[in-house]
Image: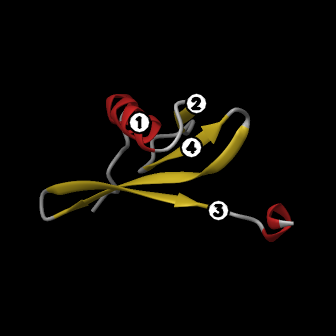
């Protein structure tokens, strides 16, 4: 079974949601190839990815943020 593709319309909806909940400057950017993930940016910094998940006919999105230990100092 093929992975679900994250569409531009979905990216726009997720961006509106995340901007309202987290940061109005946040940007959801699709990758160059059709994929189930999009990247999350604030300015030029990539914070993580949001993945599209489809199970039993229901769609959800998971946001995974990556924090490097050097960024904590």
CA separation in Å, label 4 and label 1: 14 Å
What percent of the width, then of the height, locates residue 25?
58, 30
CA separation in Å, label 2 and label 3: 18 Å
Of the residues under marks 2 and 3, which one precedes in the sequence? 2
CA separation in Å, label 3 and label 4: 11 Å
Task: In the rendered structure, find residue 25 and report the number of the disc placed on it.
Answer: 2
Q: Of all residues shown, which one is farthest toward the left?
A: 57
What percent of the width, then of the height, locates residue 70?
86, 66
Of the residues under marks 3 and 4, which one precedes in the sequence? 4
Q: Residue at x 56, y 35 (%)?
A: 26
Between circles 4 and 1, the one closer to the viewer is 1
In which quadrant of the rendered view does residue 15 lie?
A: top left
Of the residues under marks 3 and 1, which one precedes in the sequence? 1
What percent of the width, then of the height, locates residue 38?
50, 44
Identify the residue position indicated by label 1 in the image.
20
Q: As drawn, is 36 to the left or to the right of 9? A: right
What percent of the width, then of the height, locates residue 57?
12, 57
Of the residues under marks 4 and 1, which one precedes in the sequence? 1
CB within 8 Å, label 4 to label 1:
no
Identify the residue position indicated by label 4 in the image.
40
CA separation in Å, label 2 and label 4: 11 Å
| Residue 16 against residue 72 in the figure, above or below | above
CA separation in Å, label 1 and label 2: 10 Å
CB within 8 Å, label 2 to label 4:
no
Of the residues under marks 1 and 2, which one precedes in the sequence? 1
């Amino acid at each position: 079974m093929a992975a679900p593709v994250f569409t531009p319309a979905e990216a726009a909806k997720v961006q509106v949601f995340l901007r309202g909940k987290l940061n109005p400057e946040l940007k959801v950017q699709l990758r160059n190839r059709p994929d189930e993930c999009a990247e999350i940016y604030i300015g030029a910094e990539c914070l993580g990815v949001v993945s599209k998940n489809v199970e039993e006919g229901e769609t959800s999105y998971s946001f995974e943020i990556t924090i490097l230990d050097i960024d904590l100092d």
